[in-house]
């Protein structure tokens, strides 16, 4: 009995000793240096660009589609038609897919990095290689669910839908049969939810996470940062910085956690000297902007610096911090034809200046400038600022016309990325009298004799042996565009006049031909082509 008691006591003692030997020593809280920036103790984890893919249906093809569809995909699409299409109760899904006026397509796109909910992007649309579809010209892509490309296997309907796409098909003007077998929907994709941006601490510690959260919210406003654990701080990018999310993150990385006034002055002085001497000034400018208004006293000293790069970065930073006197420096850059900072100066003025101060600058740029890129930049910031200089008209539910009320060269600018639409610089632009024009395919005729009050427009029906029209259009280019684009059938009581239902691509080609032949006294220019097709060229 005594031996048994001794054995139990000995076993207990060994267990206690073992537990003491394996118990970890308490770790000290990591030291936070007074000179620590956020990037010294944490790293930014941002959502990358995400390639997406889906399968959908393009309708309105007037016989250029096909009925072929892989059986597994057909089941998915038929179910989708029943559940999602507004006219599902009046159509037979099987017949709809089998129609030569529809085509089953693959849709590809890239959600931008750090996308916000609803953020749009271009998508490329391709007929399935196994089908007899000959063209998607003039079609419309029904709402298509998009899933992460790396997670989808063939027609995997169970992968999570993270974006959708829909809209009118865009055919690049002049596209030949030898071009890549793909079409586009400009701005047709859109993200379903915002993506996360967070800070991951190098060594998790709630006190440091809380200090980071408090410093960020002190500088950028409440609820921008949220410490969700000792190792992670979630960030919400303020709307003010949606124009350049990377710049916001650049400021976050360089934000000092300790904002003690004496240290702050020393740090600002050090960065000011670096702005004068370093070649790469953008990260230094971001670090100064991260300090907020306390940096302004030092930045003012640089607004008349002999170095143009120093002046520009100091002026942009000062303007971002609310210093209105920086406007005159930025204005000088806008009108310096040799400056590489012109477009960024225009954008900075558009974001920060009062509209009453910015509009005269926009108007002067639009009136005097010959460089289309500079004029387009002025138009874009005026539009974003909701200036009365720009009036937007929605057309046929598929594109827009922006009328830019300015003097200067008459220009019709056709967008080919992000969102389809015409920008008319120098509105109103009118068609000349004595017009006769046929489209290259012979389908559209535009005619007006001297003295006519209206332009006569007509087209051959794309499928039946008859003519649509003639319809009457006004001589203003915007009126002609609407007459060409709107549907021939309008709802009873609608203020929209019937049109020919031409596609955006067809209208681009007609307007370019009219400008070239001097039937419209204006220059025509197409904007940069979407690059989404190049991303998937070898896919």
Image (cartoon, rainbow, N blue to C red):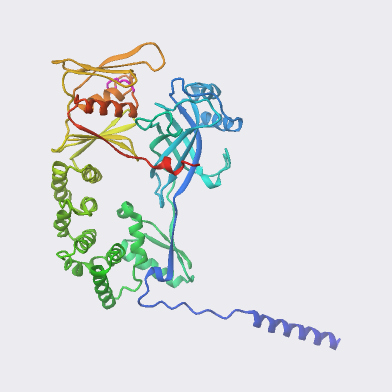
Residue 236, compared with residue 528, is above or below; it is below
Q: Quadrant of residue 137?
A: top left
Q: Position of residue 409 (x, y in %)?
A: 15, 37
Residue farthest along the top direction in this orientation: 465
409 left or right of 145 in image: left
Residue 150, compared with residue 496, is above or below; it is below
Q: Position of residue 330 (x, y in %)?
A: 17, 56
Q: Range of the magenta residues?
A: 494-501
57 left or right of 236 in image: right
Depth order, front residue of 179/370: 179
What secondary structure characterizes most of the magenta part? loop
Q: What number of labels is visible?
A: 0
Check the picture and name the quadrant holding the N terminus: bottom right
Residue farthest along the right direction in this orientation: 1
Residue 175 magenta-highlighted: no
Examine the rendering and report whether any part of residue 277 can be seen: yes
Q: Position of residue 391 (x, y in %)?
A: 21, 36
- Residue drawn at x 52%, y 45% is 149
Q: Position of residue 159 (x, y in %)?
A: 55, 44
Residue 535, compared with residue 508, is above or below; it is below
Q: Quadrant of residue 130?
A: top right
Examine the rendering and report whether any part of residue 495 can be seen: no
């Amino acid at each position: 009995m005594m031996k048994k008691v001794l054995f139990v006591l000995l076993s207990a003692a060994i267990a206690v000793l073992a537990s003491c030997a394996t118990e970890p020593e308490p770790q000290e809280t990591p030291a936070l240096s007074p000179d620590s920036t956020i990037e010294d103790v944490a790293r930014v984890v941002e959502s990358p660009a995400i390639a997406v893919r889906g399968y959908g249906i393009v309708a309105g093809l007037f016989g250029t589609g096909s009925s072929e569809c892989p059986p597994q995909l057909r089941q998915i699409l038929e179910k989708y038609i029943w559940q999602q299409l507004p006219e599902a109760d009046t159509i037979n899904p099987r017949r709809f897919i089998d129609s030569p006026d529809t085509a089953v397509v693959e849709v590809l796109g890239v959600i931008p990095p750090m996308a916000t909910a609803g953020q749009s992007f271009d998508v490329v649309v391709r007929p399935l290689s196994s089908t007899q579809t000959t063209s998607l010209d003039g079609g419309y892509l029904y709402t298509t669910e998009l899933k992460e490309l790396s997670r989808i296997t063939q027609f995997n309907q169970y992968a999570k839908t993270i974006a959708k796409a829909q809209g009118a098909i865009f055919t690049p003007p002049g596209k030949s049969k030898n071009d890549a077998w793909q079409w586009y929907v400009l701005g047709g994709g859109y993200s379903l939810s915002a993506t996360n941006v967070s800070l991951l601490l190098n060594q998790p510690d709630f006190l440091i996470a809380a200090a980071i959260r408090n410093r960020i919210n002190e500088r950028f406003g409440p609820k921008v940062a949220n410490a969700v654990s000792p190792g992670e701080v979630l960030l919400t990018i303020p709307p003010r910085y949606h124009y350049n999310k990377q710049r916001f993150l650049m400021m976050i990385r360089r934000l000092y956690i300790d904002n003690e006034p004496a240290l702050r002055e020393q740090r600002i002085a050090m960065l000011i000297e670096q702005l004068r001497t370093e070649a790469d000034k953008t990260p230094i400018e971001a670090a100064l902007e991260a300090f907020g208004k306390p940096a302004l006293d030092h930045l003012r000293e640089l607004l008349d610096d002999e170095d143009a790069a120093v002046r520009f970065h100091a002026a942009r930073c000062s303007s971002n911090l609310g210093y209105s006197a920086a406007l005159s420096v930025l204005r000088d850059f806008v009108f310096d034809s040799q400056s590489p900072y012109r477009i960024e100066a225009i954008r900075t003025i558009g974001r920060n200046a009062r509209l009453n101060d910015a509009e005269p600058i926009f108007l002067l740029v639009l009136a005097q400038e010959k460089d289309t890129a500079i004029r387009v930049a002025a138009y874009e910031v005026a539009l974003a600022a909701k200036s009365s200089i720009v009036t937007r008209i929605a057309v046929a539910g598929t594109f827009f016309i922006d009328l830019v009320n300015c003097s200067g060269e008459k220009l019709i600018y056709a967008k080919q990325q992000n969102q389809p639409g015409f920008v008319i610089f120098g509105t109103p632009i009118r068609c000349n009298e004595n017009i006769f024009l046929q489209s290259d395919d012979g389908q559209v005729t535009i005619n007006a004799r001297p003295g006519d009050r209206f332009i006569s427009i007509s087209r051959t029906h794309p499928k039946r042996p008859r003519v649509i029209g003639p319809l009457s259009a006004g001589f203003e280019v915007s009126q002609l565009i609407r007459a060409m684009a709107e549907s021939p059938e309008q709802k009873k009581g609608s203020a929209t006049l019937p049109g020919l239902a031409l596609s955006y691509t067809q209208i681009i080609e007609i307007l370019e031909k009219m400008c070239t032949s001097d039937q419209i006294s204006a220059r025509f220019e197409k904007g940069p082509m979407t690059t989404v097709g190049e991303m998937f060229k070898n896919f």
